[in-house]
Structures are given as C-alpha cells and as structure tokens.
Image: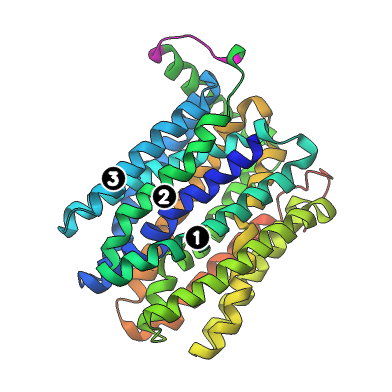
Amino acid sequence: MRLLAWALYDLANTFFAVAMLSFYFPLWVVEDKGAKELVFSAALAVSMVCVAVTMPLCGAISDATNQRMRYLRWTTLGCVSAMFLIGLLDELGVALALFVVANICYQLGTVFYDALLWHVATPGKLGQASGFGAAFGYLGSMTGLIFLWPFVRHGGHQAAFVPAACFFLLFAVPSFLLIREPAAQARSASWRSIVQHALLRLVSTVRHAKAYAGLWWFFLASFFSLNAINTVLVFMAVYTKKVLGFSESELIRFFLVGQAFSVVGSLVCSRVIGWLGSKRTLGLIWAGWMLALLLVSLNQDAKRLWLIGPLIGFCLGPTWATSRVLVVELSPKDQLAELLGLAGLLGRASSILGPLLWGLIVWDPARYRQAILALIGLLAVGLWCFRKVPDPRNSASQNF
C-alpha cells in the first residue's frame, strides 16, 4: 500500500506539469496573452535559479530531521495554493510571479518525494518501484489531459488551473495518510542547529565529491542532457501549434498517444534496468532522445511527427525513473536526500539554459530547426560526460 500511495503522488503532481509546464500555462502566456516564448522562459529560469540554490540545502535538512513527508506536505500545499490563485487572476505579471512560487514548491517537493523511494521499496526492487511510480506519473499526464480538457474547451486555457490544483491535492492525499517514516528516527533540535548541521554536511559532501564514484560526472551529464529534454517538454505544445499548425483537439490526441508510450517505456525500462543496469539503460534512453530530435529536425511535417511522437514518449517515460535509480545506487544512503538535492541543483538548473536558448533562437520564427539542432548538441555533450560515470554493478566500467 505504501508503494501504491507513493506512486499516486507521482500521478498527482503531474497535474501541475500538464497544466503549468508543458501545456496550458505556456499556451495561455504565448497565445492568449500574446507574449513571446522568451517571457515564459524567463519566468521559468527565475524559479529554477531559486530551486537550484535552495534544493541541496532542503535535501540536507530533510536528511538531518528525517521528516521528508512533512516537507512534502508543505511544498504540495504551497504549489496547489499558487496554482489556484493563477486560475482566478488575469494579470500576466502577477500570474508569472505566482508561477515562480508554484514551480519552486513543485520542484522542491520532488526532492523529498524521491528520497522516500528508499522507504517504500526494497533495495533489490528499486528499478521496478521507480518505474512503477513513473508509469503512474505518465498515467497522470493522460488523466490530466482528459480531466482538464472539458474545462479548457468551455473556458479557455486559464480554466485548467483551478481544477488542476484540486486534482493535485486530491491524488496526493493517499501518500500523506499512508506513508509514515519511522518515528524513532525523528530528531528534536532547534531550526538553527538543524540548518547548521545541514550546511556542514553539505560542505563536507562538496569537498569530498571525488569519493562518490562518478556521481559528479553524472550530475554534469544530466545538466546538459536535461537542458534539451526539459526544453522539449516545455515548448512541445507551442511548437506543434505554431509551426505544425495542430488544432487544440489534435494536440490533445498527440499528447495522449505520447503519454501512452511513456507508460509503456516506464514499465519496459523498469525491467530492462534489471538486465542492463541503470547506467546502460539511461545511456540508451538519452541516445533515443537524440535520434527523435534528429528526425524532427530533418522533416518538420505534421504527419511525420505522429510517427516520431511515440519514440519521444517511450524515451520520456523512463528518463527520470532511471536517473533516480542511478543516483540512489551511487549515493551513501544516509545522505540520500542531500545528494538527490545536489542532483536537483544541476537537474533544475538544466531548466534554465535550454529554454532560454530556445527562446532566444526562435525569437525569429524562421529558426526553429536551428533551435532543435542546438538541443541535439546539448544531448551530445551530456552523453560524452556520461561515459565517465561508472556502472554501479561494475565500478571498473567506464563506458555504456
């Protein structure tokens, strides 16, 4: 039951991703408010800078207090509240400021959520448990698109935000009620001592980075690769409508097909991890992303995209689930949330460079192909760095 409750949270927070990151909020900013894509990129960048700065410390604090569920509840409520307010307001500047708050809460919550994997799954089943959660997440994307579409059809893009906030909270409740960390591990201390202890642990972790068997090469590889992947997720809806001329209903169907293949990819790769290991599996996933983007750049045709979409979805499904397993396998378990927070620093920073680069390039609408090629270049750099990461199953391995 704990694993199911944990996976349901992955479904719950996907309502935010669908409504605010990948679909309706970017479309509301660009189409309804007439702003450039760079405006949304800038707001996203501001939120991600804040996340990148605070995420490692938040992870260290949760390790020091062993109260990850407590902080997960706080960040969830903060995200839901900001989303709800965006749905009630019409001023673009205020909405963007609230989006910054909502995204900070959403992103920080993933640190506490990921760290709970160790509590809900046995060590030998980490890959399957992580893939199970990811599959629920992409089921959540499909559910979000289906549940929110009637509101959008009758009230426009902004009408999705209040229902998305409500569904997020509704599906998060089981995890709040059923997941309990051992009470004996809780530590009673002042906030000042907790923060001091967390900072000392964080400084020690950074100073002794070389002791973590290639983990830092993985962080660097993730930074470049996720710059490309996050940009695709943020601007795919805008791209398919502006460049390929998809209607709103076609866009919904395209995303539903992609999310269905994401579920399949999550479940398949959760098994493949057991055969190939998390490192080789992730390397193949990132190579699949490169192939998909290369095919998009070669032929910007709407019919061809229907064939490429399933490949994008299949690669998307296991991307974060496999990364999560690799970080867990490479990390000391008493510093798991802290190191997940450090992974988040570069991972969330990767939502800054890529979208900003995209926004700058496509300021001229004739340069969408060049923007896609830039993303392919980022993935290539990430894969080169990834070769330096050792395989957890064989520390002597240097290549995937």
Check disc 3 and report the residue beneath it.
82
3D distance between C-alphas at marks 2 and 3:
14 Å
Check disc 2 and report the residue beneath it.
167
Dot 3: within a 10 Å radius of its alpha carbon, few (fewer than 14), some, or many (20 or more) residues?
Answer: many
- Return the residue nearer the eye: 123 or 231: 123
For residue 129, side relative to residue 302 (left or right):
right
Check disc 1 and report the residue beneath it.
143
Q: Mark 3 or mark 2, which is nearer the start of the sequence?
A: 3
- Residue at image x 43%, y 60%? 18
How many numbered discs? Answer: 3
SS at circle 1: helix
Q: Which residues are magenta?
A: 185-192
Q: Check whether the beta carbons of the residues at disc 1 and disc 2 lie within 8 A of each other.
A: yes
Q: Is residue 59 magenta?
A: no
Is the stretch drawn in magenta largely helix, strand or loop? loop
SS at circle 2: helix
